[in-house]
Amino acid sequence: MLFDSHAHYNDSRFDTDRDEILSSMRDNNVGLIMNSCSNLGEIPDIIGLCEKYDFIYGSVGVHPHDVEDMTEDDIDALHEYLKYPKIMAVGEIGLDYYYDNSPRNLQRKWFARQIELAIETGMPIVIHDRDAHGDCMDIMRAYKNDITGEFHCYAGSVEMAREILGWGMYIALGGALTFKNSVRPREVAEYVPLDMLLIETDCPYLTPVPHRGKRNSSLYVHYVAEEIARIKGIPVKEVEDMTYNNAKKMFKIK
Ligand code: NI
C-alpha cells in the first residue's frame, strides 16, 4: 500500500469529483493520505475530510505565501486545532523566495514561530522550502536538536540532504523526480537511505510523468515509488512498504 504524504484535497480543483476520486483510493492501492494545509481558512474543510474518510489525516499551519497578516492569535488557533486527534503535524511552513508572496522577514519570523509551536506541542513539521535553502537551513539549525519532520517536495542538494538526515528528519520526493530534466532529485533519491524517504504528490500540483500537465491526485503517487525503485535498483514493493511505514512513524499514526 502507498502513503501519499502530501496532498491538498480541500483545493477547489477537486470540487467536481472529490468524493468520487477519494472513494477510489483503496481499490488503487493508496492506503493513507496526509492532507496538507496552507492557511487557517482551509482548516474546517481539512477536518471535514479527516472525519469523512478514515484514511485521511491532516496537518495545520500557515504557508509562507500566507504569513503577511499572521498574528499571535493565529498561533493560538493552530494550537487548538493541533488537539484534534487526526491532525498530526504543523505544516506546511517554511520559506518561498521564488514567489515572494509575503515579505521575507515575515516569512522567516513566522516559520521560526511555527517551529516553536511544533516543539511545544510535540508535533513533526512539514517544511516548504522554495529557492530559500540558505535561510531555511539557518533557521532549522537553531532548532535541530528539538524537531522532527520532513522536507516536503525536497529540491536541495545531496550535501544539504546529508545535514538534514543528520538531524533525523525525513526527505519527501514527489512528481518532480519523474521529470526528464530533473537531475538533482534523482541524485537525492539515490543518496537518501530508503528508511528516511517519503513519497508524495502535492496534488493537485506537480503531476508526475506520464500525466504531466493534467491535475494530479494520489492515484499517481505510484509513479514516484516506481522511479525510486528504478534509481535504487530494488523492488517497487519494498519502496511502497518502507515509505508507508516511514510516514506512519513520522506522523505518529497508529
Ligand atoms: Ni503542498
Image (cartoon, rainbow, N blue to C red):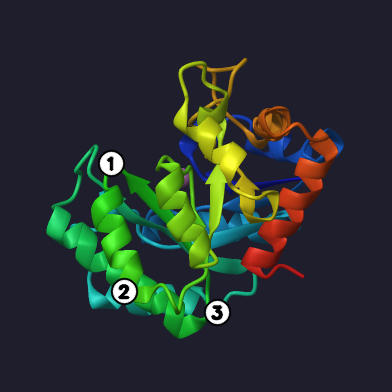
Q: Quadrant of the N terminus?
A: top right
Which residue in the structure is indicated by mark 1?
131
Q: Viewer-proximal residue, 54 or 185?
A: 185
Q: Is residue 254 above or below residue 130?
A: below
Which residue in the structure is indicated by mark 2?
142
Left or right? Give the position of 53 relative to 111: right
Left or right? Give the position of 104 relative to 148: left
Can residue 184 be seen in this snapshot? Answer: yes
Q: In the rendered structure, which disc, 2 or 1, sits on the residue that comes first in sequence?
A: 1
Q: In the rendered structure, which disc, 3 or 1, sits on the residue that comes first in sequence?
A: 3
Task: Report the amino acid beneath label 1.
Answer: Asp
Task: Report the amino acid beneath label 3.
Answer: Lys
> Is disc 3's CB within 8 Å of ligand 1?
no
> How far apart, in angstroms, are the residues tagged by discs 3 and 1?
32 Å
Which residue in the structure is indicated by mark 3?
83
Tag 3 and tag 1, C-beta contact below 8 Å:
no
> How far apart, in angstroms, are the residues tagged by discs 3 and 2?
26 Å
Residue in the picture at 71% in, 40% down: 22
Residue 238 x, y percent position in the rendering:
82, 43
| Residue 83, quarter of picture | bottom right
> How far apart, in angstroms, are the residues tagged by discs 2 and 1?
20 Å
Marks 2, 1: nearer the viewer: 2
